[in-house]
């Protein structure tokens, strides 16, 4: 059995060996084991890790990423239709995140410039804690 060692995968992805093991516990990669019990990874695992790293950098939680990747083939490269299925499934969540980022971007100048000197104009102002029933945090700026 050949394949990439965990050290090879770490060198190729820039991840620490411990991070690769962490991703493994979350089902992002599924190494095979050689006769000596050592992990061996395929080139497809580079893509899986790269996808997870990019998605995390964009703010997606690892649990969501793993859930989307759960239906991908385990020991071979995903097909174009596999990736298209994930893309379609993630699109609504990504659009929601984009809308949240745009709202934050568009209100950031006002929030920084406010200095909480004008509660009537403050996007975070919540008189009487009226929005508490909607959940924790600044509900005016962050909605899901």
Image: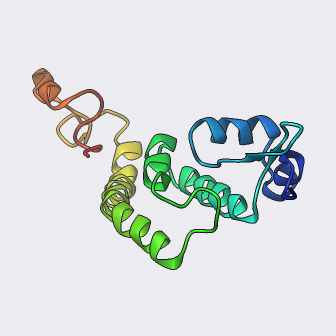
Q: Is residue 60 visible?
A: no
- Residue at 30% across, 62% down: 92
Q: Is residue 139 left or right of residue 32?
A: left
Residue 31 percent location from the top left of the image: 72, 47
Q: How is the protein colored in the picture? A: rainbow
- Residue at 30% across, 33% down: 117
Where is 76 relative to 128, above or below? below
Q: Quadrant of residue 4?
A: bottom right
Q: Is residue 50 visible?
A: yes
Residue 22 percent location from the top left of the image: 67, 35
Residue 67 percent location from the top left of the image: 43, 48
Where is 82 relative to 60, above or below? below
Q: Quadrant of residue 78?
A: bottom right
- Of the pair 57 and 137, the residue shown nearer to us: 57
Residue 34 percent location from the top left of the image: 84, 45
Q: Residue furthest front?
A: 35
- Residue at 65% across, 47% down: 30
- Of the pair 40 and 91, the residue shown nearer to us: 40
Q: Is residue 110 left or right of residue 8?
A: left
Image quadrant containing the N terminus: bottom right
Q: Residue furthest top?
A: 128
Q: Is residue 104 left or right of residue 132?
A: right
């Amino acid at each position: 059995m050949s394949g990439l060692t965990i050290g090879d995968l770490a060198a190729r992805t820039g991840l620490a060996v411990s991070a690769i093991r962490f991703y493994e516990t979350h089902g992002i990669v599924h190494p095979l084991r050689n006769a000596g019990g050592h992990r061996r990874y395929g080139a497809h695992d580079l893509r899986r890790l790269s996808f997870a790293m990019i998605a995390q950098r964009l703010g997606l939680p690892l649990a969501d990423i793993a859930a989307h990747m759960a239906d991908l083939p385990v020991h071979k490269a995903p097909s174009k239709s596999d990736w298209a299925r994930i893309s379609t499934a993630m699109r609504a969540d990504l659009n929601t995140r984009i809308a949240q980022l745009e709202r934050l971007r568009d209100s950031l100048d006002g929030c920084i410039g406010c200095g909480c000197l004008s509660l009537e104009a403050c996007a975070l102002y919540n008189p009487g804690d009226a929005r508490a029933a909607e959940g924790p945090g600044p509900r005016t700026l962050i909605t899901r």
